[in-house]
Amino acid sequence: MILKMKLTIFAMLFISTAIFAQDSYTLSGTVASGEDNAPLPGVNVVNVNTSQGALTDFDGNFQLQVSNGDEVQFSYVGFVTQSVTATGQTSVNVLLAVDADQLDEVIVIGYGTRKKSHLTGAISSIDGGEVAAIQANRVDEALAGKLPGVLIQNQNGAPGADPKIQIRAASSINGNSNPLVVVDGYPISGSIATVNPNDIESIEVLKDAASAAIYGSRGANGVILITTKRGKDGTPQFSYNSYFSTSSRYQVDNVNPTSGEWAQTIETNIANGNWDVSEVDPALLQYRINAYRDSPDVVAVEDWLFRNGNSMNHDFSMSGGTEDVNYFASVGYQKTDGIAITQAFERANARLNLDAKLNDRFKTGISFNGFVSDRDIVGHDMRDLLRAYSVHPIYHTAASIAFVQQLDQQAQALGLDPFDNGFRGGSDAPWNNSIYTLEPGDTAQDWHYGRSGNGIGGSGDAGPATKLDNTDAYQKTFFGNINSYLEFNLIDGLDLRTVFGADLRDTQNYFYRGLEFDSRARSTQTALNQSDVKQTSLLSETTLNYAKQFGKHDISAVAGVEFQNIFFKGTALNGSNVPFGEIINFNLLDPADIATTERDETIARNSIFGRVNYAYDNRYLVSVSVRRDGDSRFGENNKYETFPALSLGWNIHNEAFYSSEVLNLLKLRFSIGSLGTTSDLGAYNSLSLLNPQSTLFGNGFLIPSDIANPNLTWQTNTETNYGVDLGFLRSRFRLGVDYYTSDIEDILINQSVSEVLGTTSIRLNSGDVRSSGLEFDLTANLIQNGNFTWSLGANLSTVETEITDLGGLDELPQTIYGQSGRGPVFRNYVGGEIGEMWGLETIGEVEMIHVEDPTRTVGATSGEYYVKDQNGDGVIDRTRTVEDGGDLVKIGQNTPDFYWGLNSQMNYKNFDLSFQLQGSHGAEVFNIDPLYWQSQFGGRLRDSFDANDDGIADHNGEFYARARDQTDAVIQDASFVALRNLTLGYTFNSDLTDKLGLNSLRIYFAGSNLLYLWSSDYTSFNPEGVETTNGGYLGPTTYGVQVGASPIVRSLTFGLNVNF
Amino acid sequence: MKKVYIFLVGSLLITSACTTDLDQVPPNIAASGSLTEFDGVLNAAYFYQHGSATPMAVMGDFRADNALMEEEPYPAFDRFTMDLTAMEDQFFGPFYTALYKSILSANNVIENSEDDTQVGEAKFLRALSYFKLVQVFGDVTVNLSSEPSTTDTAFLARQSAGDVYNDVIIPDLQDAISLLDVEITNGRASQLAARGLLGKVYMHRGNFAGAEGQLAAVLDGAGAAELSLQENFADIFGEANDLNSEIIYATQISSSVVDEYGFSEFWSWSGGLDTKSLEPLDPDLIAAFDASPGDLRREVSIDTMLMASPKFPQSGGPDHDWIELRLGDVILLYAEAMNENGASAEDVLDVLDPIRERAGIAPLDHTVLNTQALVRQAIYDERRLELAFEGQRWFDLVRTGTVNSEMGEEINPNYHVFPIPISEILASGGIITQNPGY
């Protein structure tokens, strides 16, 4: 390759010398980009006086014959043309400034592309370089904080878990907010994580309705368009990217005390009179304190559960092509061990993009993308693992065995129950069921230490290590997508294109829980579950595309039809009474203990759509589109809906009358469009179906979970967007501002109903939600000189929603959502926001002095708060608001007031430094983790606290209530500021890479979440973690409860990028 | 241009690979409107009864003086305050849900089936469901339709317990008696089950004459239905004895049929297997057995070493049926009805002989227990020992008005019933109301 280039240069030189006169001389030099100092290959270098020219080589070098006084012009697409006069100098280095006016990027829009300057909607764009530079495991991680109006949150730090992506306001009260992901024009089934970050050429996010309306009923959550890399003409380019990283939980200090620490706390508090233990038998008290203090070899539960994780990633790609055939191929492999034990993720992926020009009029191509992944999941509720008390080692030692036996003797001497008591459930258990036969190395179980009444073991469970050792949970996914296109040029400017493809996603879930999990060996607690669901999607799309420029008119149009079928086919086996043993196999179960469920669903959609874009003289811009969708999921009376959109733009800076050097770009945009969503609909939600259930008398038909609704219809989301784009000082500073309002009509609601109806909720189209938001996007090229460049990007977004109508109701039925009912009252009412959290106002925690025995469990608090009787009626009423005569007040809301991102990119000589900050402010969570950790069994209040059990504390006359039962005591501020990424890279000089035969070589260090700030009010591991998987979760109407979220992960990465 | 046409045709043909039919129905699941046979719906009505068994057991014994909870907040069962609402998710909520689902399934059979036996069984299950609901909650919503209105929610308003008895439970049981056979097949509802339940319902209503008639008919018909007392008290209970000759009606439970109730099962509670109460046995019940020396039921019912009940042991645990009505219960109720109707102490106490004989204790002496009040108390005491940990005690105390005297404390009558799930009050927008005191 290097030889070839040298030959080229030599040839140019040769030609030049052959032609020019003797008084000329050779001018040589390098041309680089003024933005990032990178050499620019292929720059046109022309001697204006002789019209002779040359192109810069791969390293930006050129040579050209000039005479004194000749003007040499350097031009390159996207850069300001620059001239140099030959004055006898033999060498010149040129930095070309980026020309914002000229740099008319082509932006991918739905079913086509458009020049950026002709855009009329609200579209955020990010190029693949930015995604690759961050080297995140996943595309969505790289995007966090980069795009205005796009909020990406890690609800769960587990590797392989999808984050929550929300574009602008929630488009649906109930459904998920996942945007539609379209890869190379093909809407894929599944999340954005299906795409390897290294394969990405660019990402566009369609935010406003007019841009997304071409996707009709699928566009309401926004659309993410991903363009993957395709080969370019030329010799093969190879690229190898690799990194290794190590990770840990962000918060290093343990939240919960160990028994030894607790012994000190007890002694201090008794000594200073904060606690009153007068009602505790002194002998028992001393026994317990000694036990806490003396328990040997204690391992903190958090130290056991969390570890250092690590990750490695290799990615190899090649691309290239001839005049007729281009290719891009990549393979990648990633393996991660998460920060919680048993968490792991492994994935191998491959992509091939092939494009062929068959003749002047025919083009065709095929793309394949596939991966296999294996995700190991913490097999048991993290909330339950973390609430175990740190009173013992994970595996018994000789010392801990001696200790528990001694402790048991002491307990019995005090007249307390023997520890073995109550564990007779294990009498026919095939393992050790007495603390007197323990061997070192056996798992240390909570009950070996007694229970809260007779020892320090707390719940009497098997304990977290035994629980986790006897569970296994994983998910394997196989994904493949093949799609092909044929394109035929009918006449100049008119192309017919047809796309046909299919994807298959096979998801296998496995869960096992063994008999030993339960300290009482109840076989009903065992489980062996396995499911396998194949989701197949077939898509056929045929479009006519027209694009033409006539003088000042620039017109493009597209019209098409699209058909899609999605099939779900699968089975789930749920086994119970799993026998104890080494081998775990369905064949060992009694056939009657295996319940089989079958899934067989078909969704059919068909659509017709069209759009016309028109630009006049780069000044006036119009886009009109319409789509009509049919979808089998809706009621028989409402299968079809039409989604129109219109958008307008005005490039004021291109007007003759406009002249401003300072504000060189001034563009106004307006759009209005309508969208739908189907995200929360199952295949047959409009039908009333009798799910089969095996019963002792044979097959049973269960109560339908849906009540038949032939009128189930589309909710339509009408959105208006006002935007302005400003560019200052030759666009060194650019500011985009968008304001939108969104009005959702016939919103699909999961309305809670009385269970007398046989279901907890019914799906209705009723109501209207209005939301609005403001988005700012600022980019600044702060410094641009030869050695140093610095650019900054900043964005900020606000969202407000208001329920304006609920189909005649003032309020949806209130719902308490949370782990085992420990949640706030979620209210959704006209005039309010979606999913407001209501509850009782607390006026202080019930002091420890009132706890009868504060030493009973490790970390105990009273768990009770004084609550305010708002209306003074002498009754605490959790079912009505203060207005309606009850005591409920608004205690929180999970939507942030605003969120922002700040991105910086610096280059100094061979170094590059970038960082990415993300912040979110004003959201709250109902966080019950601290309660589970500290006072799950509540320090029981002494009888004299409320002698007559009337719910009023006798000493001060205040009402009191458990913190977890709908009070504001567990509402916490979930605001955060995160340094998502900090990367320092070094690119080696070309003389070194040339010697190695490489085109470029970069190494980098990166850290994610090196800094993560949260409110002092927040006391768990992850303010972004919100629970959405417990039964009864109804969508955004019940969003904001936190239970057992996996911690924020901090990682350090070393990686390299090689091109050759 | 030919190529263009071929190309166009080709792309259209590819399109036909997709189905364009938007009227999709699942191939493997029946739609509600399409049923012609209702046995599957009836099976579901039986199935849903599972979900009521454990809550019934816990309410029946742990609320009363037979069993105690240990770990907060569960001891709310042993206190008589509004604290008990904390237990709704695990007990009252699933109980409520299960029974109204059983009712909906039964309504579907009653409305649509043309098979008398199916309708009879459905009426029995509907009556049983409402009977349980009324005992637990007092006034309750009545739904007699298989497709209740989702928009007109006025019908959700709770109706008085008396109306529910008179308008639903009693007529349904009377219909069931006339529609069902005497023969008991495979654990399904039968004529005698309906009669026995009606007798029990009449006892709750204070209609002792009606009760005596129905209960006598059960005892008279027992032979024909192959019902008889087990010789050995222990042989009534546990998986191995499911559907034994003494069982008139039991909700059948198998670990192979996963029910919708997701928490510890009734036998875990009485057996002290749930960590919330490892030693559930109330010393008060031990004292009651102490007062009946030589009683063979003691070993079967309580274990004072383990402080739990071995009646439904862990081995074979998940498969224990939940006994709704057995012959021993009917005999005790019959004696009680006779006594209330003024029969002589001798006649009444004779009825109890087989029960006491089986328990290995001497017959009660009518010369000692020579007043109606003394006989009444003797029967109450007998019931407690005979039916301990069968989910009966609390409801017997409330029925007989002996809560305060037996529990030895002054209990606000508000707490004779349990709290309505708060989600019901919220979801109905307040049409369904909470019981006073909660």
Image (cartoon, rainbow, N blue to C red):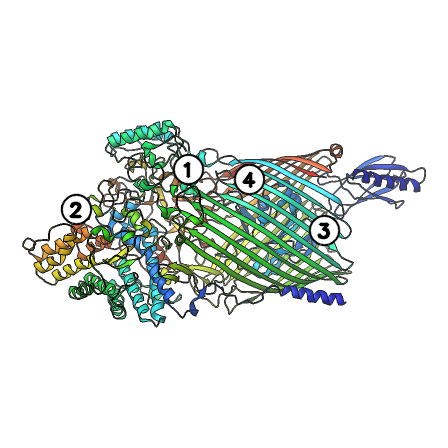
- Residue B195, percent from left and from top: 22, 65
Marks 2 and 4 share the same chain:
no
Q: Is residue A830 left or right of residue A332?
A: left
**Kind of residue sitting beneath label 1:** Ala
Residue at position x 90%, y 45% in the image: A50
Q: Is residue A920 left or right of residue A14?
A: left
Element on which disc 2 rests: helix
Element on which disc 3 rests: loop
A1059 w.r.t. B25: above or below:
above
Q: CA distance from mark 1 to mark 4?
A: 22 Å
Q: Is residue A503 left or right of residue A76?
A: left
Residue at position x 80%, y 41% in the image: A56
Which quarter of the rendering shows the N terminus of chain B? bottom right
Q: Earlier in the sequence, mark 3 or mark 4?
A: 3
- Residue B57, percent from left and from top: 27, 52
Mark 3 neighbour density, 10 Å: few (under 14) some (14–19) many (20 or more): some
Q: Earlier in the sequence, mark 3 or mark 1?
A: 3
Does the image show residue A85?
Answer: no
The label number, if any, that marks residue B289 in the structure image: 2
Mark 4 neighbour density, 10 Å: few (under 14) some (14–19) many (20 or more): many
Q: Circle 1 sits on which residue?
A: A465
Q: Chain for mark 1?
A: A
Question: Which residue in the rendered view is the most extreme toward the left?
Answer: B367
- Residue A423, percent from left and from top: 31, 40
**Kind of residue sitting beneath label 4:** Thr
In contact (CB < 8 Å): disc 1 and disc 4: no
Marks 3 and 1 share the same chain:
yes
Marks 1 and 4 share the same chain:
yes
Q: Circle 4 sits on which residue?
A: A336
Mark 1 neighbour density, 10 Å: few (under 14) some (14–19) many (20 or more): many
Viewer-side residue, A880 vs B156: B156
Query: In front: mark 3 or mark 4?
Result: 4
